[in-house]
Amino acid sequence: MIVDPERLRAHGVTLGAIERASADATSLVGGGFIDTPNQRIAVAQLVGIYNADDLGEVMVDYRGNTPLRLRDVAKVKEGFPPPIGDA
């Protein structure tokens, strides 16, 4: 994701808000268990983020009645982190 500082300013959003929204959307949390008299059933959590388009749809905040999405303040694309330390 490449955040555009101009669009952040235009929408009044901080980089911290972008980081929180993307982390919340992609983090896995245990679903726990449901205990029945005969068994314990594990509850699975589905994230729902499978590609860059899905991540772009994640809501950061509301502006009036309109959701502000990650794609509105950043270019969301699939890629790789820069190679640091490779010779």
Image (tube, helix red, strand yellow):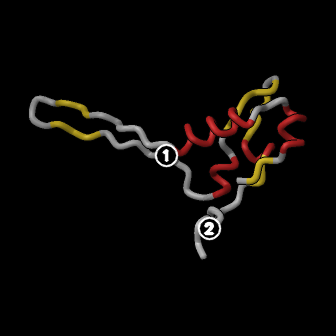
The one nearer the camera, 66 or 60, is: 60
Residue 69 lies, with reference to residue 36, above or below; the image says: below
For disc 2, the marked residue is 83
Mark 2 element type: loop
Q: Amino acid at mark 1?
A: Val
Residue where numbered disc 1 is placed? 47
Q: Which mark is nearer the camera, 1 or 2?
A: 2
Residue at position x 72%, y 43% from top? 70
Q: Tell me which label, 1 or 2, sits earlier in the chain.
A: 1
Please state the horizontal and vertical placement of residue 64, each as a whole percent of the image. 82, 23
* Quarter holding residue 44: top left
Answer with left or right where residue 77 lies relative to residue 34. Answer: right
The quarter holding residue 33 reads top left
Q: Position of residue 61 (x, y in %)?
A: 72, 30
The answer to whether marks 1 and 2 mark residues whose Cβ atoms lie closer than 8 Å is no
Residue type marked 2: Pro
Check disc 2: other Cα within 10 Å, few if <14, some if 14-19, many if 20+: few
Q: Which residue is the extreme one toward the bottom? A: 87
Q: What residue sits 60% from the left and 76% below the top?
A: 87
Q: CA–CA distance between discs 1 and 2?
A: 28 Å
From the viewer's perspective, is 86 left or right of 67?
A: left
Q: Residues within 10 Å of mark 1 (few under 14, many from 20)?
A: few
Q: Position of residue 54 (x, y in %)?
A: 63, 51
* Residue 3, placed above or below residue 77: above
- Which residue is painted at 84% across and 29% down in the image? 12
